[in-house]
Image (tube, helix red, strand yellow):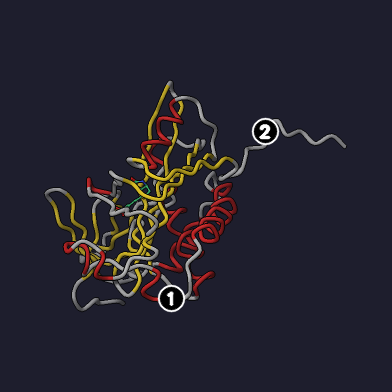
């Protein structure tokens, strides 16, 4: 029997590029993508001088203290559908941490990974359309070894690292391997079977059926979080019982979270 490999896509992580210091792994991989790099290429760095987070924030990326990684995707999706990709990454990160370290992280929509209510990891998804074809850079940052007092003052009370909750040595390679393995399992489901991704994401979601406040530039919406759509948008039930979809913004939970 002849097996055709013509349409077989290389797996995520089939080509890995390791650096000591870069500005941002997302920026390095973006340049590679523009130059034609194939789907699945991964850039990892020991430190970043201009690590970026969502909503124009910085990502604190000191030498050897975290996992700073970006993954190149060339999905068959239109821009509007790419919201499922950071959801996929968050689901894979949460499951990998749970399995490797037996601590159960919680996801805050869309893709903040929390432990004990503090930020452990984040995902920055950047899309670019070039010559009618779309590529996506999924950047993942995980705090690994930082002691609480080593975080900058403005992050100290909101951040946490794996080391704080797990005494044992955290192996970056093992963690990356686990994340890529899970992403490889989930990625083929983005076209038509994304319920699998959503189910795994919801398993780790810390605010399902809870009251949340969504803040957008000039708007605040309070409602009950009911889940996510296949494009990763949040489903919020308003006090009027109407359910709306929210595509971007930031969630906060009330001091005393009300869940139903
Ligand atoms: C967030 O704000 O929660 C997202 C943080 C994403 C940080 C990662 S670290 C690797 C990649 N390179 C960057 O510059 N940012 C992402």
Q: Residue at x 51, y 60 (%)?
A: 175
Where does residue 203 sit, x and y in percent of width and height? 46, 68
Asked if disc 1 is less than 8 Å from ligand 1, the answer is no
Q: Residue at x 29, y 72 (%)?
A: 117
Q: Is residue 2 left or right of residue 135?
A: right
- In the picture of the structure, the residue carrying the numbered disc 2 is 7
- In the picture of the structure, the residue carrying the numbered disc 1 is 166
Dot 1: element: loop
Mark 2, Cα crowd under 10 Å, few <14 / some 14-19 / many 20+, is few
Classify the position of the C terminus by image quarter.
bottom left
Where does residue 17 sit, x and y in percent of width and height? 51, 41
For residue 250, above or below residue 203? above
Q: Is residue 191 left or right of residue 26?
A: right
Tag shown at residue 215: none
Dot 2: element: loop
Classify the position of the N terminus by image quarter.
top right
Q: Residue at x 35, y 67 (%)?
A: 161
């Amino acid at each position: 029997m002849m097996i055709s490999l013509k349409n077989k896509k290389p797996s995520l992580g089939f080509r890995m590029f390791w650096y000591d210091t870069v500005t941002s792994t997302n920026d390095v991989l973006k340049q590679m993508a523009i130059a034609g790099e194939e789907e699945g290429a991964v850039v990892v760095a020991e430190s970043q001088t201009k690590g970026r987070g969502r909503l124009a924030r910085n990502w604190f990326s000191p030498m050897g203290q975290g996992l700073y990684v970006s993954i190149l995707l060339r999905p068959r999706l239109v821009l509007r559908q790419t919201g499922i990709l950071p959801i996929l990454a968050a689901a894979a990160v949460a499951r990998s941490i749970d399995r490797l370290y037996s601590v159960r992280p919680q996801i805050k929509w869309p893709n903040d990974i929390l432990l004990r209510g503090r930020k452990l990891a984040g995902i920055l998804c950047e899309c670019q359309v070039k010559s009618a074809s779309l590529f996506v850079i999924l950047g993942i940052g995980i705090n690994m070894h930082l002691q609480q007092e080593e975080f900058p003052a403005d992050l100290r009370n909101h951040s946490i690292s794996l080391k704080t909750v797990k005494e044992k040595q955290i192996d970056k390679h093992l963690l990356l391997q686990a994340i890529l393995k899970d992403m490889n399992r989930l990625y083929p489901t983005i076209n038509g079977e994304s319920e699998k991704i959503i189910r795994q994401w919801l398993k780790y979601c810390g605010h399902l059926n809870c009251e949340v406040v969504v803040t957008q530039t000039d708007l605040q919406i309070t409602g009950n979080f009911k889940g996510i759509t296949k494009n990763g948008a949040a489903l919020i039930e308003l006090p009027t019982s109407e359910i709306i979809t929210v595509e971007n913004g930031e969630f906060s939970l009330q001091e005393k979270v009300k869940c139903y």
